[in-house]
Image (tube, rainbow, N blue to C red):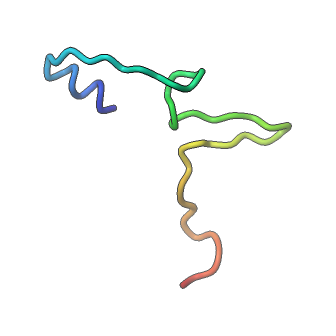
Amino acid sequence: MTVATLQRAHLHILLIERHNVPGGFATSFRRGRFEFDTALHQLPGVGLEG
């Protein structure tokens, strides 16, 4: 998202991706029959209040 914004401002950008799949933390992976979102940090409404 940031790179696209900077490119629209006509800046020259070099994006170096460390992950083996483009997207970095905006990707997911599978373990067995489950799929995990690596960008997931919060689950509203799950768990105890307070």
Q: Is residue 8 left or right of residue 44?
A: left
**Is 44 situated left or right of 9 in this image?**
right
Q: Residue 37's x, y, as percent?
A: 62, 42
Residue 5 placement (x, y as % from top left): 23, 28
Q: Is residue 16 above or below residue 33?
A: above
Residue positioned most to the bottom: 50
Residue sitting at 52 percent across and 37 percent down?
25
From what the image shows, is residue 40 above or below residue 45?
above
Name the quadrant containing residue 28: top right
The quarter of the displayed image where residue 38 is located: top right
Which residue is pictured at 14% across the width and 23% down the height? 9
Query: Residue at the right extreme?
Result: 32
Q: Residue at x 68, y 43 (%)?
A: 36
Total labels drawn: 0
Q: Position of residue 30 (x, y in %)?
A: 75, 35
- The N terminus, quarter of image: top left
Using residue 23 as the reference point, say whether residue 8 is left or right of it: left
Q: Is residue 3 left or right of residue 23?
A: left
Residue at image coords 29%, 24%: 4
**Quadrant in the picture for the C terminus:** bottom right
Residue 50 or residue 17, whichever sits in front: 17
> In this rendering, is residue 35 above or below 10?
below
